[in-house]
Image (cartoon, helix red, strand yellow):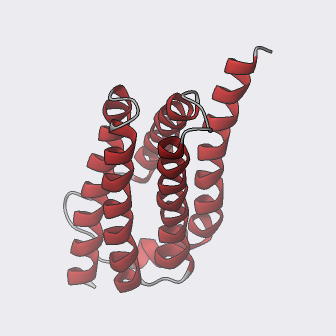
Amino acid sequence: MQPKMFKLLISILFCQLAGVIGGFFTRHSIPIWYASLNKPFFNPPGWVFGPVWIILYTMMGIAAYTVWHKGLRTRGVRSALAIFLLQLILNSLWSAVFFGGRSIGGGMVVIVLLWLAIAWTMAAFFNISKPTVFLLTPYILWVSFAFVLNLALLILN
């Protein structure tokens, strides 16, 4: 395998790992706890989340690879990837707090921090490779929707 393809694959799999970690906390809470919550009319069906996240994690991996490909010797690249790692940790933490801890309020705190970290990542990536912002835009839009959904769940429950 070519080094570029290997780095791309590693980047995508690393992001997908965040989904696997989040899924560990999610899968046990959905059929019991989450199913018992009062949900807003715009709550998507459960089957939507898996495919959406797989696509988003793939796009995040491509964006991270694009920045990584610019070279780790550059301080800006290292900083941008550190910020990216922070938002990826917050991504998994949201699932751990919201589903694992069954804390809607705690989820609100984490999702606000996550949204801010994604915006920070987009700004840092923009300085290195402008097209990466287009790869991360669906992600911040989805997390914005998740924020609204989280807020509605907090109000309804």
Q: Position of residue 15 (x, y in %)?
A: 59, 45
Q: Quadrant of residue 105?
A: bottom left
Outermost residue, top direction?
Answer: 2
Q: In which quadrant will I find the C terminus? A: bottom left
Please state the total of marks drawn on the protein image. Answer: 0
Closest to the observer, 154 or 82: 82
Q: In which quadrant will I find the N terminus? A: top right
129 on left or right of 8: left
Closest to the observer, 33 or 153: 153
Q: Residue at x 52, y 37 (%)?
A: 64
Q: Position of residue 26 (x, y in %)?
A: 56, 66
Closest to the observer, 132 or 29: 132
Q: Residue at x 63, y 27 (%)?
A: 8
Q: Residue at x 51, y 74 (%)?
A: 99
148 on left or right of 37: left
Q: Position of residue 69 (x, y in %)?
A: 58, 27
The answer to whether residue 114 is above or below residue 15 is below
Q: Position of residue 63 (x, y in %)?
A: 47, 34
The answer to whether residue 131 is above or below residue 64 is above
Outermost residue, right direction?
Answer: 1
Q: Quadrant of residue 122?
A: top left
Closest to the observer, 49 or 122: 122
Q: Quadrant of residue 147?
A: bottom left
